[in-house]
Amino acid sequence: MIEICGIGGYSEVGKNMTAVKFNGDAVLFDMGYYMQKLMDFEESGGDRRTLNYKSMIQLGMIPDDRIIDSWKNNVKAIIPSHCHLDHIGAIPFMAPNYKAPVIGSPYTIEVLKNSIKDEEYNVPNEIKTLKTGKLMKISNDVSVELIHVTHSTPDSTIVAVHTPKGIILYANDFKLDDTPTLGKKPDYDRLKELGETGKVKAIIMDALYSGANRRTPSEKVAREGVEEVVVDKINEGNAIFASCFASHIARLKSFADFGRQIDRKVVFLGRSMSKYVNSAEELGIASLPGVEIIPYRAKIEKFLKKMKDKGPEKYLIVATGGQGEPNSVLSRILKGSLHFKFTPNDTMIFSNMVIPVEPNIMNRVEMEKAFKQQGVRVVTSATNPNVHVSGHGSLKDMEELIKMVNPENIIPSHGDLKKTEPLTKLTDKLGYRVGKELHLIENQTKIELK
Ligand SMILES: [Zn+2]
Ligand SMILES: [Zn+2]
């Protein structure tokens, strides 16, 4: 019998964690962070230095893994699927409770190790890399495999756990992109090969956008969207600013390439930029020649002053903070606290989506308003739909993946039931019955597969 426990990420978009157990061996997929809860805590005056494992569980910031307390000694591996914080962010606080190695793809592990070093966390677990396409034995009966897939950060994987009772696939997060602008297409051959064995017992699948009945557009579309707004005569003589997630190396590379094409110095601002970009360059995943990264506040202030003197029209600046976070570099420039002032006809490109929760939505509305009040031309996916595409698949991506791997059971993940339930439009058609082969679960749910 195989047991699966949805620990986190099934009642919210965040803090992903799932456990799988076969006889005496258990594997944990992801230990994610729920960023929103940290923001709530800090906004109500909390101090993050006072937080520990217990208080973080109580505040809902990390998955509540006490439900698998009785499996603790069975855990043989902790496997993050990719480097996003909602998948790896809780590892430093939770992994030390298990006597098991953390195993992930090279980029995921590089980012994790850099975070642990930067924040000076104490993580005694062994941390191992496993390249995609390779298997690793973690016990007599069980081996794990990482399968390359496309998403919005490099080296994302679908995890396969091979047991004598069948294969469990963990596809959280993914989209099927046939024309990625960085790295390869998903490893369709391997996925089909697994499907053809008829042994895929279950797939745990990112169903966040199951409500959208289409295939998510390729990153190539966003690259063209970025090109269109950056390489545009309208920008001549004016500053160009953009915001993008720091882990989205493909998108950052598009900004770097087109900034260079129009002879601008490309500068990334912020600490997370240096963490993700340096990790990608170190591993040879991407090269961003000529890009300057300025991680620290004091230096950012100095740089912006220099930029003002030299002429803002000579630069393209990419910063984080596109969620409208009140403390971000962008917010502080807008408030005039960083010795830089926008002038009318400057451009601000939001190349990201707003994580759809109340404070973010409001913060972003306020931020866009503040830019417009200063006369800045604001480009968003509302004005230019191609300036951002999602890294999460839609219903058609899910359909293709299901057909490829032919699973006996499906467990939708990456959101509450409102987000994952629309998957039934598809699974009904394919013959998966709710409660029988399709398991719509919330956090803290255990299921048994015979
Ligand atoms: Zn992700
Ligand atoms: Zn995610």
Image (spheres, rainbow, N blue to C red):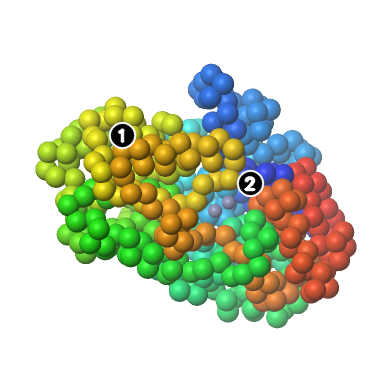
The amino acid marked with disc number 1 is Ile
Locate residue 27 relative to residue 235 in the image: left or right. Answer: right
For residue 149, which quarter of the picture?
bottom right
* Residue 22 percent across, percent down from the top left: 78, 56
Q: Which mark is residue 13?
A: 2
Mark 2 crowd level (few <14, some 14–19, many ≥20, 10 Å Cα): many
Q: How many marks?
A: 2
Mark 2 Cβ and ligand 2 under 8 Å apart: yes
Quadrant that contains the N terminus:
bottom right
Between residue 402 and residue 193, name the one nearer to us: 402
Report the Cα–Cα distance between label 2 and label 1: 30 Å
Locate residue 348 relative to residue 31 in the image: left or right. Answer: left
Q: Is any atom of residue 373 visible in this view?
A: yes
Residue 295 to residue 46: above or below: below
Residue located beneath label 1 in the image = 333
* Residue 18 percent across, percent down from the top left: 69, 49
Q: Secondary structure at mark 1?
A: helix
Between residue 101 and residue 159, name the one nearer to us: 159
Give the residue at the far left of this rendering: 310
Residue 331 to residue 186: above or below: above
At 64% from the left and 79% from the top, the residue drawn is 193
Mark nearest the camera among 2 and 1 is 1
Which of the marked residues, 2 or 1, is nearer the chain's N terminus?
Answer: 2
Locate residue 449 relative to residue 300 in the image: left or right. Answer: right
